[in-house]
Image (tube, rainbow, N blue to C red):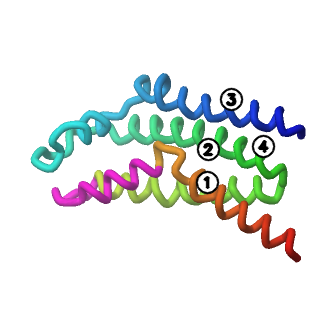
Amino acid sequence: MKNSLKVISLIILVLFLIAIREFIAPILYDPLANYFKSDYLYQPIPSLNLGLLFVSTFIRYFLNSVVSIGVIYVIFQDIKMILFASKVYFYLFIILIICLMAILEFNQGDGYLLLFYVRRILIHPILLLLLLPAFYFQNLKNLKN
């Protein structure tokens, strides 16, 4: 792929990530967003519809994952990396959604930071920021060998 096409593709994909955050996130059910914007240390977690929260979180995670995998593809163009990243995204979602639901179901009142960070990893493309350097250094290592 030509460098100019790569740059344009990356810009479009980053704009998609921004659009997911700005336009799709407000449509989805997430009462925790307002909760964490307020004085959450002194308020109990609001009552939640866990099923609807699961569906909304899944949609946002799925959209972020697809765009993030697209970014990885545009940068590296390696199917093995795409398959590995897809597996990482899949298994991490299973683990984190179970953790999120367990935290919400069995909350004893002092798990705010854990809830905050698990939710943040699920709804933001943070994993992309971890995978890009890892794949970059793996690529460098493979080039040396």
- What secondary structure is found at the residue carrying circle 3? helix
Residue 88 percent location from the top left of the image = 63, 59
Q: Specify the segment rendered in magenta.
A: 105-121
Q: Residues within 10 Å of mark 1 (few under 14, many from 20)?
A: many
- Circle 2 residue: 65
Judge whether residue 83 is colored magenta: no
Q: Earlier in the sequence, mark 3 or mark 2?
A: 3
Alpha-carbon distance for marks 2 and 4? 14 Å
Residue 115 position by quadrant: bottom left
Query: Compared to 143, does 81 lie above or below?
Result: above
Question: Label 3 amino acid?
Answer: Ile
Residue at point 32%, 51% (across, down): 116
Judge whether residue 111 is colored magenta: yes
- What secondary structure is found at the residue carrying circle 1? helix
User: Residues at badges 3 and 4 in contact (C-beta under 8 Å)?
Assistant: no
Question: Label 2 amino acid?
Answer: Ser
- Circle 4 residue: 74
User: Residues at badges 2 and 1 in contact (C-beta under 8 Å)?
Assistant: yes
Residue 142 position by quadrant: bottom right
Q: Earlier in the sequence, mark 1 or mark 4?
A: 4
Nearer the viewer's eye, disc 3 or disc 2?
Answer: 3
- Circle 1 residue: 89
Q: Is residue 115 left or right of residue 131?
A: left
Nearer the viewer's eye, disc 3 or disc 1?
Answer: 3
Query: Compared to 73, does 55 lie above or below?
Result: above
Marking on residue 12: 3
Q: Residues within 10 Å of mark 4 (few under 14, many from 20)?
A: some
